[in-house]
Image (cartoon, grey):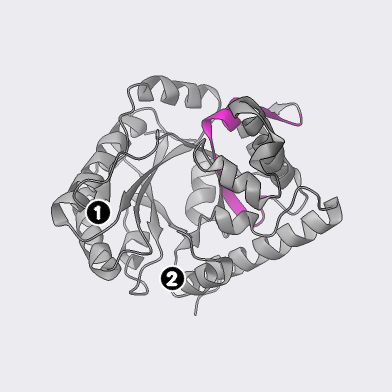
Amino acid sequence: MNPNQEQLAKMRDGKGFVAALDQSGGSTPKALASYGISETAYSGEEQMFDLVHQMRSRIVTSPVFSGDRILGAILFKATMERQIEGQDSADYLWEQKKVVPFLKIDNGLAEEVGGVQLMKPMPDLDALLDRAVEKHIFGTKMRSVIKGHNADGIAKVVEQQFDCAHQIMSKNLVPIIEPEVDIHAPDKAECEKELFDQLNAHLDKLGEDQMVMLKLTLPEQPDLYEPFTKHPRVVRVVALSGGYDGNEANRRLRQNHDVIASFSRVLAEGLKADQSDAEFGAKLESTIAAVYDASVNKS
């Protein structure tokens, strides 16, 4: 692997968090509704994605959104193909904001089988990865979901994630492996311990030149994943909010040393389309400050 070395150093050693701006077709209507734009305000996917790109662009171009506190940002495919202030989105993020660009690459989740939801097939992954390289993307993100404690199911989730990760690393991109544990799983703690063991086994099989990131649900046992933050093959461990509100996500994050945030819903909490730029900036600033603080200051 030979990723961008300046970006790699920032992701490995920088202070801050990763912004998740990767709502896809399925989650976009909900994101827009929270932003104050109802489904009656647009017709069809194209208009919907135009509106969500405007929302994302407003976040990214805000003066409070910068590489001082935000290490990276995860983009949706349509965002990668669009521009922000006349520049390709990934180039704008890095050249104007010093924020490392990532790309969400999965096609969504398959139906639940054996207590887990694997990723849907990705027959066009190779072409998408080539396009990501052309667009100066640093890394990728792909999500599976664990709904209950089933050792075979969790093993399949991790195996699928690492199979894709090898393909991604072959393109000199850094994969974010995201086997989310559903926060409503009745046996969440047991799922997380099983996941830890499975991840650990696969990480130890990686070659010396292979690097991944991990995006994990904030665990019931604080610092469960701390050993991964010191693993030589792991660039960074980031946490998803998973449906926790901002206060609870930040509270849990503070209990997990050397783990930083990669929140999506939390980042957009309280942002509205009809806010003035001053109101929008003030709300975004308060959110960024709180998430940054929880990422770098631990209890």
Which mark is on residue 246? none
Q: Residue visible at 25% across and 61% down? A: 196
Relative side of 276 to 228, left or right = right
Q: Nearer the viewer, residue 298 or 9?
A: 298
Residue 69 magenta = yes
Residue 275 magenta = no
Q: Residue visible at 49% across and 27% down? A: 132
Amino acid on which disc 2 is placed: His
Neighbor class of circle 2 (other Cα within 10 Å; few <14, some 14-19, many 20+) is: many
Q: Quadrant of residue 17?
A: bottom right
Circle 2 or circle 1, nearest the eye? 1
Q: What separation in Å lies between label 2 and label 1 (alpha carbons)?
A: 18 Å
Q: Residue visible at 36% across and 22% down? A: 126
Q: Secondary structure at mark 1?
A: helix
Relative side of 174 to 80, left or right = left
Residue lying furthest front: 40
- In the rendered image, which residue does mark 2 sit on? 257
Q: Which residues are magenta?
A: 66-85
- In the rendered image, which residue does mark 1 sit on? 199
